[in-house]
Amino acid sequence: MALPEFPVEGGCSCGAVRYRLKASPLSVYNCHCKDCQRYSGAAWSMSMIVREDDFEVLTGVTEVYDRKADSGNVIAMNFCAKCHTWLWNVPPAGGIKVVRAGSLDNMDWTRPVGNIWTDSKAGWVDIDPALANFDKGIADRTPLFEAWTRSHQD
């Protein structure tokens, strides 16, 4: 699927928080961890890894919930202060944000290239074995970055 012309925009359900993505994400993937299932109300959440420099908040205020991950790391979860839409999180590694793909104004181009935490997926979910898949979370996201790049080569 072709990438859009950047920048693209997104935001929360009520419109109070708006953001701009100035360049392609490094990857788009599905996360099947129990936290993402609870936060999204679905079997997984779609995540876009974006460089901090490529992400700009245009309007609005977010509230932050510091969630302690299974790894012991603290993840800063950002929600709209008004409608509480989950928009992005900031991993401790720094330099990136993990943005919810569903918060984009148009997510037609965000076909996931992989899955993480597949060992906690819902039993009825079928995982495509041709994608970059991982039983747990991953510290080195390079395979997801490479899969995204391959999927968008001309």
Image (cartoon, rainbow, N blue to C red):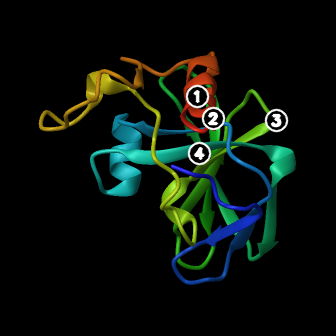
Q: Which mark is residue 95?
A: 3
Query: In the picture provided, is 154 more to the left or to the right than 131?
Result: right
Image spot of residue 109 (x, y percent): 52, 55
Q: Residue at x 72, y 62 (%)?
A: 5
Identity of the amino acid at label 1? Arg
- The residue closer to the viewer here, 72 or 133, is 133
Image spot of residue 69 (x, y percent): 52, 30
Kindly check if marks 2 and 4 are in contact, taking CB atoms under 8 A apart as contact: no
Q: Residue at x 68, y 44 (%)?
A: 25
Q: Quadrant of the C terminus?
A: top right
Identity of the amino acid at label 4? Met
Q: Is residue 61 above or below residue 99?
A: below
Q: Which mark is residue 153?
A: 2
Report helix, strand or loop for mark 4: strand
Report helix, strand or loop for mark 3: loop
Mark 2, residues whose alpha carbon is within 10 Å: few (<14), some, or many (≥20)? Answer: few
Report which residue position mark 4 lands on.
48
Identity of the amino acid at label 2? Gln
Residue 98 showing in the rendered view: yes
Q: Mark 2 or mark 4: which comes first in sequence?
A: 4
Report helix, strand or loop for mark 2: loop
Q: Residue at x 54, y 65 (%)?
A: 103
Q: Mark 4 or mark 1: which comes first in sequence?
A: 4
Report which residue position mark 1 lands on.
150
Quarter location, residue 58: bottom right
